Amino acid sequence: MPSVSLLTELIDSLKCLPGVGKKSAQRMAYHLLDKNRQGALQLSQVLNEAMQRIGNCERCRDYTEEKICTLCANPRRDSTILCVVESPSDVLAIESTASFSGVFFVLLGQLSPLDGFGPEEIGMPLLAERLAQNDIEEVIVATSSTIEGEATAHYIVQLANKYNGNIKVSRLAQGVPLGGELGYLDQSTLALSIANRNRLEQ
Ligand SMILES: [Zn+2]
């Protein structure tokens, strides 16, 4: 007799999903066993394959099954503009706006030396290599507006300047969200919005 039943093991495994605690995991396990064994088998097969075959692009570190991802391999993308983001999901978010035609670099984290995330861990040597090729004219730093995100941005600015003094480095605009009411904004966002105000066309 195994000490832990398969059912218990299934419930415990489901808890690795984000936002899923014991109760939700139990509900999911019973739902799959009761009503959707076929879907569950399909899920387990795709999960297995995805976890084994999805790696990181050798050029930008985004997720891909190939050596080089489709974005990096697309000759229609403007490879002189490099947008640096923290995670692959940021690439997806920016791509969904269809407002950026350059290429990406994914840090896979942010600078946080106390948690063991130094420049090496977040791919800075690869980014430096990329900048050293001298074909990039603009770097857009799209890191979070947290302390770690700001520290990461600062590091990237210094790195870019070190490799190419003429490179243009920009940061995503921060401020009042579309449809946002000023009264509900936190003070620091409002202060940033005032500091980064845009001149209106006259
Ligand atoms: Zn890529």
Image (cartoon, rainbow, N blue to C red):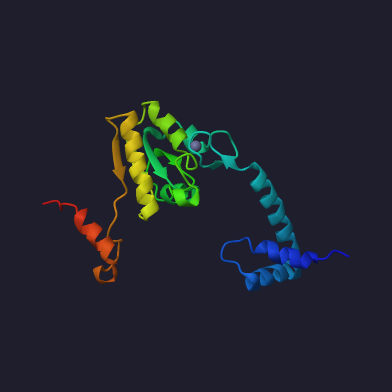
Q: Nearer the viewer, residue 89 or 112?
A: 112
| Residue 129: % across, % down | 43, 29
Q: Nearer the viewer, residue 187 or 43?
A: 187
* Left or right of 200, for residue 124: right
| Residue 18: % across, % down | 57, 62
Question: What residue is drawn where x is 80% and y is 66%?
Answer: 5
Question: 179 above or below 78?
Answer: below
Q: Nearer the viewer, residue 31 or 144?
A: 144
Q: Nearer the viewer, residue 167 or 157?
A: 157
Question: 1 above or below 113?
Answer: below
| Residue 144: % across, % down | 38, 53
Quadrant in which residue 157 is drawn: top left
Quadrant in which residue 153 is drawn: top left
Quadrant in which residue 21 is drawn: bottom right
Residue 142 visible in the snapshot: no
* Left or right of 106, for residue 165: left
| Residue 27: % across, % down | 67, 72
Residue 184 visible in the snapshot: yes
Question: What residue is drawn where x is 69% and y is 65%?
Answer: 12
* Quarter of the image where the N terminus is located: bottom right
Question: What residue is drawn where x is 28% and y is 30%?
Answer: 165
